[in-house]
Image: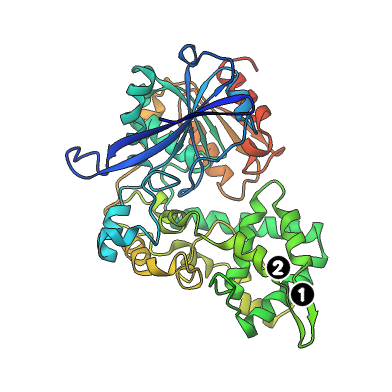
Amino acid sequence: MHRYRQPGVVLTDHQFTVPLDHDDPRGESIELFAREVTAAGKDPAGLPWLLYLEGGPGFGARRFTGRQAWLGRATQEYRVLLLDQRGTGRSTPANRQTLPLRGTPAQQADYLAHFRADSIVRDCEAIRPGLTGGAPWTVLGQSFGGFCTTHYLSTAPEGIHTALVTGGLPSLDATADEVYRAAYPRITRKNLAHYERYPMDVERARRIAAHLAERRPVLPGGFRLTPEAFQSLGLMLGAADGSHQLHYLLEGAFVRTPSGHELSDAFLEGVQAALSYAGHPLYALLHEAIYAQEPGRATDWAAERVRAEFPRFDAEKTLAGDEPLLFTGETVHPWLFETDPALAPLRETAGLLAARTGWGPLYDRARLAANRVPVAAAVYHDDMYVDTAHSLDTARSIRGLRTWVTDEFEHDGVRAGGPRVLDRLLALVRDEV
């Protein structure tokens, strides 16, 4: 166990061993990593625990420096545990380098079937007693972390003292098709708002896409930049400053060279940094599986299939006319496993996961309707990543849940708003507002 300091905080690294399959506790095990954070000068033994579940899937817990964002507020009264969910960060990472150790693509897919919210919550319950002495803890779930928190309330509410959710109340029963059918109109709105803010980007985006349709460059890291890959920069539009960052990226796209105008090295480097899945491959591999709950139904590349119902997102058709190019958002497509070198070796595995059936339900409506855990959720008014209508329907389905619906923040409000968001949620569960 390593203990060290950063400004204002004391950090302690924890390692845990848990079963890969909690239904087979004597079978294979995997390692979990978590970082404990307490305020300098406070006695951690006297503080209650707060477990933070990061968004994703596929992202390790954020690496804070000192008391950044909401963490400073949390450490005023909690002992915080930043968990790298299984397969992410330092928790037996699953990626193109490690997954071949599992064997064939079919064996890799079987392995990854244990990396959804149900297994993550059972991991939490496996490590909680040893940390808290058996006491329940407060859980803060951001985005996919909120999906995990909702599953936690469905299956092990006795482990939770208080639940806080930011931008992460899932639909309890929507299929992957229904999730994306609701998503594309939201993504369209974000695109139109971006172009209203930066009208000069309409021509810039079309020009870049037309160039890519002819050239399809391979970036220095091996990423193949197609028009469709370029469109996926729309993922940025769901963040607080994402529209502005996208504008700055587009404005420097071309430079004049002896051979004519070419895409600049700076632009291509920025695009690769924004689009690469090297740091979070599970996001692409499991993103649609987080919505799978019907045993007989495969997700079958839902985002790609549903996209055909929204022809305005077709780059080829757009370039043949005079409409603005629409960027896509939080959608995963099969061509990602051809363009991104971090995903290409996992193409067959991804296809098997998309075709997989037998997924179990993640949420228990009856148990949520009888909930007794204090719960508060921040719901962002036009969240690009999580459908607001779905979230509010779920909020009405969880007994006692109190919502804060706001358009002050985008999906990453707990990062951008930090202490204010956490303050508001804590006040809600404590009946202070």
Which residue is painted at 77% across and 69% down in the image?
202
Residue 396: x %, y % from top left: 50, 32
Total numbered labels placed on residues in the image: 2
Query: What amino acid is labelled 1 in the image?
Result: Phe
Which image quadrant is residue 370 in? top left
Q: In the rendered structure, are the residues bearing label 2 and label 1 in contact, judged by CB atoms less than 8 Å apart? A: yes
Which image quadrant is residue 208 in? bottom right
- For label 1, the residue is 254
Which residue is painted at 38% across and 17% down in the image?
135
Q: Is residue 134 above or below residue 417?
A: above
Q: Is residue 129 above or below residue 151?
A: above
Which residue is painted at 64% across and 23% down in the image?
423
Q: Is residue 427 left or right of residue 372?
A: right
In the picture, the quarter occupied by the N terminus is top left
* Mark 1 secondary-structure assignment: strand
**Mark 2 to mark 1 CA distance (whole Å):** 8 Å
Residue 267: numbered disc: 2
Which residue is painted at 48% across and 21% down in the image?
374
Q: Is residue 186 left or right of residue 169?
A: right
* Mark 2 secondary-structure assignment: helix
Q: Is residue 89 left or right of residue 123?
A: right
